[in-house]
Amino acid sequence: MSLENGFFGPSEILIDYLAKLNDPGRYPFTRGIFPEMFRNKKPTVRQFAGFGCARHTNERFKKIISLGGTGLSTAFDLPTLYGDDSDAPLSRHEVGWDGVAIDTVEDMDVLFLGIPLDKLTISMTINAPAAVIMAMYIAVAKKRGIPLSALGGTIQNDILKEHIAQNEYIYPLKHGVKLATDLMEFSARYMPKWHPVSISGYHIREAGSSAVQEVAYTLADGIVYVEELLRRGLKIEEFAPKLSFFFDVHNDFFEEIAKLRAARRLWAEIIHKRFRVPIPEKYDLKSPELQSLWCRMHAQTAGCTLTRNQPMINIVRVAYQALAALLGGVQSIHTNSYDEVLCVPTEKGVKMSIRTQQILLEETHITNWVDPLAGTYQIEYQTEKICEEAKREISNIESFGGMAQAIEELYPQKKIHENAIAERGEFEQWIEHPDKYPEKQYFFAEDDTTDEDLAEISEEVEKRRKYEKEQKENLFMFKKHRYQTGVNHSLDKVRMAAGKNENLMPVLQEAAEASATLGEICGALRDVWSGAKEIPGVSSSVSRKTAQGITKGYKFPKPVRVLLAKAGHDGHTVGFYILRDIFQTMGAEVIHLGMGVTPEAIAKAAVEEDVDFVGLSALIGYVPGFFEDLKESLISYGGSHIEIIGGGIMLPAHEKYIKEKLGIKNIFVPGSSDFDEIIQNMKKRVGQ
Amino acid sequence: MKEIGIFERSALAYIISCFQKYPNMEIHIDRSDTWVIGVTGVTGVGKSTLIEKLIETFRRKNMRVVALLIDPSSQKRGWAILGDRRNLRSNDLDCDKGLFIRSLATRGEGSALTGALPKIIAYSKLFSDIVIVETAGAGQTDVEIREHVDTLIQVLGPLGDSLNLEKAGQSEEANIFVVNGREDFKSNKKFFASAELTLGGQCLDDGWKKKVYLANAETGSGIPEVIDGLFEHREFIKTIKPRE
């Protein structure tokens, strides 16, 4: 009886029930934060939506409400997430693409037109510019005469995990944390119903961490925010009840359930032992002290487990993951759409994922029971194990002086990267040795995508392309009709305040009300704080051996120069680093231009560097648009002889379009396309 | 605004490649009095950040700039990753037609670059008002760079005490010293004081008195003074006999 045998008995697991588990709703809340859990309130079906201009998303919101939705969740487009306006050069091909484009307070007003902000809870998934977006939201509420105290909802506002995993940050770390904490402090003082942060492990896990790392880094982030807020003179009961958490639900079924239980227990222990909140004698659900101990959690199924080659089977994956989330006792769930790996969750896909949750909540009767797996030897063993290991990892972080310092030393980034490489290595084995792993080969099988499916998606894509034009026109008209002197004045005030040590929320709100745009306000802060620098040192998860496998040992016969860049805002670096490793293996001189480059800047650099190849990676947005622009820019800079190599995740229809209509033959889609063809093309150009 | 035109741009890009590929290639290059500034200092001290600020200033004065970035990054089995250019990126500079940036790999010690660099600099002068050369503060290229630049800046990081100054190699040769006082360096002022004491006012062979500045390349504070110092040196070299 042991881990090796795959089962445990009573002798291995000594459960100290009161200390480690206790009843649901009682410290340390391993079994759930509420006494009755889902018997009293089922988890919220919180699907996240947003696309196009404000008016398009507003229509979708109204539809959700008419179907009986009680909560809304807003997805913003990439330019908005990076605090840029829709008319910024870098925003091209991304406006309104995978979220709604919000540039101005007017957009924010339209987004929630006819929606009672004091009755529904609104969730907003945004981080780096969260304080500015919130200022706009508050301005809209004020205009409608709704008091701050009546606003309920959540804003993600977790800047630390952006530095650890998702790369959507726009200021140096300490300023980013300052801005995020300003919003939390403001909310704690004036918005009793608002959750001003959703401390997220999701993106950490998606970047390749283990379950233990996910728990440890998320809670360590939480500790930073708590300490910052205490430093500002708030009492812990004034803000801790409104801290919320967001976890990923991955494939390892029991581990995920144990992880959620462990996270709840650990957070309660941290708040109790470290921040000295007493364990209540009477469990009054309204008491802030009790609520401070709660780890409220939202869960989302793991996007990184979905496959492109067989989209339909993702439905089954999502269902199992949602089941694990439910058994783990979360407060709300987002189920992914089976087709979102193809970049465009269609209405069909969204409906399917909502139905998945509804079946779980309404048909399986699981919600009749509270923490049904408690007491099983195996779940309790795993919960204990994750708790202990996460504690150790948190104390590693503490030895740097906290998460902020650990991030500066790249510690969590490197640990996650190590884990990602190890997991990736296992996966590569399946590909390399199909004979050894026959049972894994189903994974790589491909669906015959019918033309009909593709047509449906392509139609959607065409629809999305039109949003950019509309939004830019909106913005142009908005800027034309505003009082420019007032805007300049308000931006100066933002700059002044940013240089001092005061809470920025009031000046941000003033700027939003004075019609300054998101890009202008974020830009004013950047003037004072300077922008974020890309952090070197973390590379792709492809091993040298794999890179050699891809290139089949081909080496350039003479010095070849290659320029690599990533277009657009998107911070996913995987495809980009794979290309870099491949070229490195072939012996090229690689000029690394980094992320967030416009096609024109790439073309200019490629010409000046006199490269043979220019590699462009693009993932989100209208991908062919980036290639179209690069091609045109190359011609205008006199570099039409430079060969383009594209890397990225794109729809088959886009790949076809780029190859046939733009004449760019070398397109590499990691995981699905064959690199041989590109090597053949390169050989033709530079010789054997 | 003055620009480096489309044909000039491609020509310069192409010829630089040729100089590197064919070490024996000689073409006639007209003499030009374009100002050449060298920037040296150890890795991570903030050369790129300083250069970015210099370029921004020169561009505002409507001077065309060619920046040559010599990257010593690892040279195994032929490959190299050149990342310096990434540090010079900004919304204003990205598509600036009055600016030309080229990354050069050293291609090993005793490299082709050592021979080609003087020709590359000479040719670059024809297309610009200022050529900025960034080197890594180590290796042969660096020792030789002094002969090919008019003004040499050494960037110092206040990491140690004044003793380290003497180990810094190039201290002998530079005209201008910039102590890059980034926020994370604690002893900025103290280090600056000792650098000033050790280096400031020392005379080079041509009679130039070395200048030491405290600046923060990240925030731009102290940069205008560095620029003034650069122009002062430029005026100075005009007064002494023209260089070969």
Image (spheres, grey):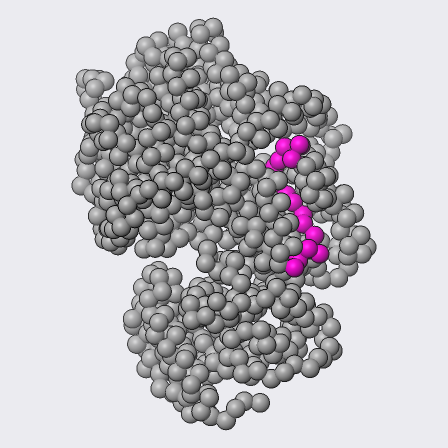
Quadrant containing the C terminus of chain A in the rendered view: bottom right
Q: Nearer the viewer, residue A508 or A561?
A: A508
Position of A437 compared to A362: left or right? Answer: right
Expressed as whole percent of the image width and height from the top left, the position of residue A432 reads 72, 36
Out of B98 and A612, give the one closest to the viewer.
Answer: B98
Report how many numbered discs are placed on residues in the image.
Answer: 0
Q: Is residue A608 visible?
A: yes
Q: Quadrant of residue A344?
A: top right
Against A316, residue B103 (above or below) is below
Residue drawn 62% across and 45% down? A628
| Furthest residue in direction bottom, as rendered | B241
* Range of residues picked out in magenta: A638-654
With respect to residue B202, does A177 lie above or below? Answer: above
Q: On the rendered structure, is A208 left or right of A29?
A: right
Residue A645 in magenta? yes
Q: Is residue A5 visible?
A: no
Residue at position x 44%, y 10% in the image: A361
Residue A427 at x, y = what percent?
64, 34
Does residue B222 belong to the magenta stretch? Answer: no
Report the front residue among B143 and B217: B217
Residue A56 position, x and y percent, is 44, 26
x 71%, y 79%: residue: B27
